Amino acid sequence: PQKSLMRGLDNKKKYHMKHSLKYITTASSGLSDLPKYVAAAVVDDNLVLYCDGSNKILEPKHDWVKKLLEDDPHHLEYYKRTCFEIEPPYFKVEVSRLKQRFNQSGGVHILQRISGCEWEDETGEVIGFNQYGYDGEDFISIDLKTETWIAPKQQAVLTKLRWDADKARMKSNQNHLTEIYPEWLRKYLAYGRSSLLRTVLPSVSLLQKTPSSPVSCLATGFYPHRASLVWRKDGEELHEEVDHGEILPNHDGTFQMSVDLNLSSVTPEDWTRYDCVFQLSDVKEEIITKLEKDRIRTNWGKSEIRGGCSCSHCHRCCWIHRLQKEESLSVSFEKF
């Protein structure tokens, strides 16, 4: 369901030091074995606070978050009130409203919201966002530049017209997305500096399923997630015959990514002209791995790759250790 809302980062070589605070909320109906409301606060793709509004569970995910909430009881009270009292009934009503809008009765239905901000520490630039998805498709999102709402679906037009006319709602969104949330983000970065601003380099391995399969260059165990991984030939980045994978989380809070190289048109004599290059944001040194047969691991023998995952059964391992159900909090409430 989050696929349309949460898109991966591009593999780029140039970065701005951007930090992000995301409040992700998921409300559902028709799922008896799951909470009807779950929420999370995510800083730079790190789950920092998890909430189960149905069972009134608020769980800080790091010691620095616990310390922050102890030092600022008003902050703790805000999250409790929002997560336990305000948002669960609000989202329950809105799910029912959207089911009527879409002429739905039974079945499983999910309403999601992602709101928050990105902040660049060098320039101070702030980008706020607030977007909703329903049943896995984008429903409506805010455009702060034009002070309007974008409705990609016909069923959202009525909501757009009503919200566009509500100037107080737009003002509240602007205040939270561009003023309050950036202030909170800077506070979280200060408290969590030792973990959020750390730099961890990965181990890089070459993997191949069969002799005729593409060679996969896998970098795993890096942090933060702002990184590039490319294949080069004679020092030049390749754009053909390569397939970039997504950046994925490991269970320990680090990340992994891969890029495949199709060898069908590469002669054995030309192998020495190829290498895989990993570069982490704000780290000058590159990790260069030459394309050599002795470096390639296959799935026919056991080996371990950083992160504690066995590679005995698949040529790519450590795939998708997911963050907990991320979902969460915003303070302005819009009726659909």
Image (cartoon, grey):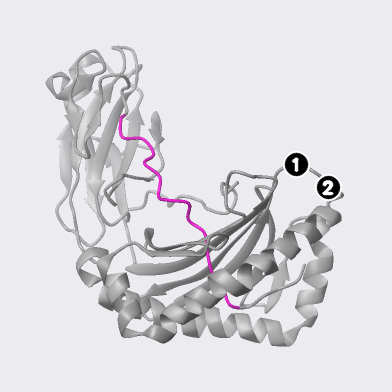
Task: Name the mark on residue 223.
Answer: none
**Mark 2–mark 1 CB contact (< 8 Å):** yes
Quadrant location of the C terminus?
bottom right
In the rendered view, tell whether residue 233 sits above or below residue 325.
Answer: above
- The secondary element bearing badge 2 is classed as loop
- Asked whether residue 15 is in view, the answer is yes
Residue at the extreme front: 55
Mark 2 = which residue? Answer: 104
- Residue 294, given in percent of the width and then of the height, sits at 12, 20
Image point (16%, 44%), residue name: 287
Magenta part mainly helix, strand or loop? loop
Mark 1 = which residue? Answer: 107
**Disc 2 to disc 1, C-alpha distance:** 8 Å
- Residue 290, given in percent of the width and then of the height, sits at 16, 31
In the rendered view, tell whether residue 249 sits above or below residue 176.
Answer: above
Image: magenta residue range: 317-331
- Residue type at the position of mark 2: Gln
Q: Residues within 10 Å of mark 1 (few under 14, many from 20)?
A: few
Q: Is residue 315 left or right of residue 57?
A: left
Is 98 in front, or is 91?
A: 91
- Asked whether residue 151 is in view, the answer is no
Q: Residues within 10 Å of mark 2 (few under 14, many from 20)?
A: few
Q: Please check the rendered image and state whether residue 318 is part of the magenta-colored stretch, yes or no.
A: yes
